[in-house]
Image (cartoon, grey):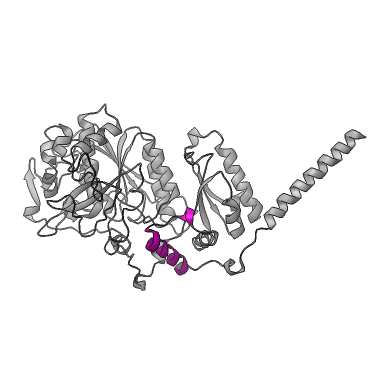
Amino acid sequence: MIKKSIQLIALFLVFVSCTREESTTNTIEIDPTQREPLSAAQINAKIDESFSTANSFDWNQSSNHLLWSAIFQGNKIASIGFGSSSTDFDRSLSPNNRQIENGILALIQQYEGKELDQIVISSDEFLNQMDVIIEKQETVIALRSMQTIRYFEPADYKYFANQNPQSGSGYQTQSSGESGCGFESSTLNVADYTAVTPNAKVPWAFYQHNIPSAWNYSTGAGITIGVIDTGTSPNQTLLGSSFNNGLSSGRTISKFGTYVDSIWPWSTGTDGPNDQCGHGTSMASAAAAPRNTTGLPVGVAYNANLVTYRAASNVVLDGYHEQNGVKNAFTGLGNNASVKIISMSMGHIFSVGKITDGVNYAYNRGKLILCAGGTSTSFTNFVGVIFPAWLPQTVAVTGVKEGTSNQKCDVCHSGAEIDFTVQMQRASSGNTVPVVSYYGGQSDYVGGSSVATATTAGIAALVWSKNPSWTRDQVLNKMKQSATYYPTKNSQYGHGNINALLAVQ
């Protein structure tokens, strides 16, 4: 009888517990004024307000209503980073990641009332990160109370696409207006290069950093640079079948694609490794174009290997497939043991959790990661160093004018997070850096923090090739020691211009 009573009491307690849990699920109160999602214009206004007052924006600091509205207006897709701590992002180092993930999904099912196949879009193979469909504000509120969620963000909210260029907000960038893309070519001014054997053109900017003198010690042989960008042109043979041309030999170029060209977030087929923008081709050229016989510009590390990724359609990481493509490129390069250096000349004006995870994943595998500090036409003085260049795991680079280390180029960003500068804008003509163009046999000019970053990646390859047994930190320290302001960083321009000759001696 006593045993039966105990059983009845136990059943009653289970019933009460379940009832309370069910009651909790149904008792999240929504302010009547916040039951409808904000419009895209209202969301952008909130983001702009944060930049005006705090000079930054972070989804983790936003209200439940703003976060839910952005998820709702972004195809109802959310990105969730989970783990047992704020640094628990790597699945291979996280033994209970599936348990945590399943707990989060169970809560989403509880509030959304849907099956898993109607909720989960993707679950990352290497990171504690997933993308899910969420419709209810109650779900957002419930999820934000979970201790196992590291970040919770809209996965497909497009700030720039929703921004009205006529609004006077001052945020229209060169990247968002022109997307950093272009297939044009230019006849190079003879003052902007020096002809060298066997028949290559050395950009004027290389001499400002003593790169040609550094070639007497190192040309980047044996080092592999990974370039995350818009891909590499199939029409530029110097970055294809003629990658080993002239004085460049014994090296390889590999091309991959992680970008999905689709309006549907659930699409998974990439559009391949080929550049359909032009920007990625320019970056690959600046870093490692061959010292060729065809009368075209040479890259900094002309004997280094290249691994290029088409990770986005342009340089503005403003959508689901762009951000996913970059994340996957970072994990891909992180898992590539031959890659030492990663160069990325793309970004956003606020952080993206899944990209941060990708950066951390590659960084923890010993990669030296260089990112562009930012290039724009109208908010250079309003937004400082962009994401992910501001992360402590990355090396932030910006461009400066000829003969200086503390006068940024006309469209370049500066700020406390900058580590190095590259001279990439001529003082008199304003011309930038010569590179090989999208089409074979043609050249062009490219500028901004983008080319500054790719140039620095090439210098890093020179240093690492000269000292192949060194770690990332040893290479980085040598670069710092050779720079303008070592040992005290400039408040806006970091260590300044690198002297490549000193860095390889």
Give the residue at the far top of this rendering: 469
The N terminus - image quarter: top right
288 vs 295, left or right, is right
Residue 233 appears in the rendering: no
Q: Residue 29 placed where, x, y %?
A: 65, 61
Q: Residue at x 61, y 49 (%)?
A: 116
Q: Which segment did they paint magenta? A: 41-61
465 vs 322, left or right, is left
The C terminus - image quarter: top left
Q: Is residue 60 above or below residue 34?
A: above
From the viewer's side, name the closer residue of 277 and 476: 476
Q: Residue 155 placed where, x, y %?
A: 47, 54
Residue 58 drawn in magenta:
yes
Give the residue at the far bottom of this rendering: 166
Residue 52 drawn in magenta:
yes
Q: Residue at x 28, y 52 (%)?
A: 415
The chief SS type of the magenta part is helix
426 vs 20, left or right, is left
Q: Is residue 215 above or below residue 208?
A: above
Q: Residue 469 placed where, x, y %?
A: 26, 26
Q: Is residue 473 above or below residue 168?
A: above
Quarter location, residue 293 = top left
Q: How many marks?
A: 0
Q: Residue at x 21, y 47 (%)?
A: 421
From the viewer's side, name the closer residue of 383 and 137: 383
267 vs 190, left or right, is right
Give the residue at the far right of this rendering: 1
From the viewer's side, name the closer residue of 303 and 53: 53
Residue 107 appears in the rendering: yes
Q: Residue 430 placed where, x, y %?
A: 14, 59
Q: Residue at x 11, y 40 (%)?
A: 212
